[in-house]
Amino acid sequence: MSTLIEEAVSRQRANFNKGVTRSYEFRIEQLKKLPAWIHAHEQDIYDALYGDLNKAPFECYATEIGIVLDEVQYMLKHLQGWMKPQRVRTPLTQFPSQCFRLSEPYGVVLIMAPWNYPFQLSLAPLVGALAAGNCAVIKPSAYAPHTSALLARMVRELYPDWLVTVVEGGREENSALLEQRFDYIFFTGGVSVGKLVMEAAAKHLTPVTLELGGKSPCIVDETADIRLAARRIVWGKFLNAGQTCVAPDYLLVQSNVKERLVAAMKKEIRRQFGKEPLENKNYPKIINEKHYRRLVRLMEDCGILAGGKTSDVSMKIEPTILDQVHGESPVMQEEIFGPLFPVLTFDTLKEAAAFVNGREKPLALYLFTKNKENEKYILSHVSYGGGCINDTVVHLATPHMPFGGVGSSGMGSYHGRESFTTFSHQKSIMKKALWLDLPLRYAPYRKWALSVLKKIQK
């Protein structure tokens, strides 16, 4: 396997070095292939995602297919402008000259995708890689075998293997890939594996983007619209059965509105998922038994305000609200990545901010409030990747803003122009004129040269 992977990477690098991928026309041609294939095979995508995660068609389109299509359309609209040299100001000390930046592709990039949104999180980075003029190796997650097989088939039908290759498999294939020298690595997944990826990349001084995760808080103060907050929190938390990197991981609610919010959330769970969520055919399952058992263990020793039922047969867990939780509880020691929602309380907003800041920086934060001062306080006092005010999750569903983490929740970002920038090296160029050559900088230095230089640099 290692030899086959090495040959695939070498083949891509040899063809990249020929310069075929650099032209605007070539990049646009490759991008246009994706929407046509997706539309023609939409049902196949639904079937694959249902087989892996039990996702309903609406959820498949809203959270996977639609986001990829939006990314492609945004790239097609703006790529030509982004590829042009970007003029920048030139300091007076360098007169006469002009300065500009050129975006050039890195070369051969590795995209390592997770299992929770296996279609979107494989192809959205690929859109950026192709737009920037790279060749790419995609490694889908072995935990989502139906989607992995579909991606392999799609790439074979759309692209020559010297441009895009899908490597299927598990840990052995991951290890073999990380032994190779890539020009860029884009990884989406957990913190522990992200560290291994970064360690492997360091051996070749390969730049990386790490889209990780963490415990993303959802803060609800006493001024919030409780009914609407409950609806949007329940939707964002239990989307994909909580298996979303930016899902609210725990709830921080002001003490005097806790009972009202929990009651409203219970109503919303029933409204959105029915009386028996485990029997709802559109409610996603946990990806595999390992993760299912982990989540079941996390519920132990917690009070249950809603849900709590499980099915070993379907590997589903009801949307569950947990009580009697504190900062040292097992459920607060790791990213939950499932439909369990611990509830903690606070009395003052400063207390809530201190609780969040006492932990690793989260990938997302959600604040529900009508108070502008409270909004301003959280935005200025808490560090996190991104988030929403009075909503959850939807901040990542736009190509107009970069998406990424900070600290242990990740490094680097993508979506829209940021994807193009991520997969491009920004080459800085200064073009000096030939009609004038000032003698000031050349040795031997005159006594008056330093004073003249200081005046110019002011």
Image: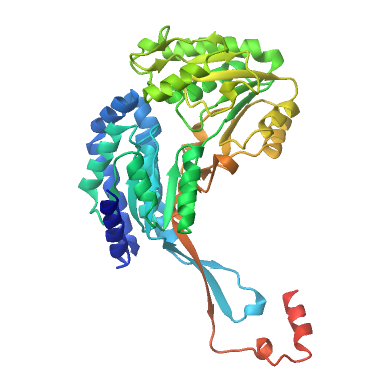
Asked whether 109 or 329 is in front, the reply is 329
Is residue 69 among the parts visible in the rendering?
Answer: no
In the image, what residue occupies the spot 39% across and 31% down? 62
Q: Nearer the viewer, residue 188 or 458?
A: 188
The colour scheme applied to this rendered structure is rainbow
Q: Is residue 25 visible?
A: yes
Q: Quarter of the image containing the C terminus? A: bottom right
Residue 301: give x, y in percent of width and height: 57, 12
231 horizontally vs 361: left or right? left
Residue drawn 60% across the image and 69% down it: 89
Q: Nearer the viewer, residue 130 or 122?
A: 122
Q: Is residue 213 left or right of residue 120?
A: right
How far across and how far down the image is residue 304, in percent?
55, 10
Q: Which x, y percent locates residue 382?
A: 67, 37
Against 375, residue 404 (above or below) is below
| Residue 156 coordinates in the image, percent (x, y) | 22, 47
Q: Is residue 69 above or below residue 253?
A: below
Q: Is residue 349 above or below residue 170?
A: above
Give the farthest residue toward the top: 275
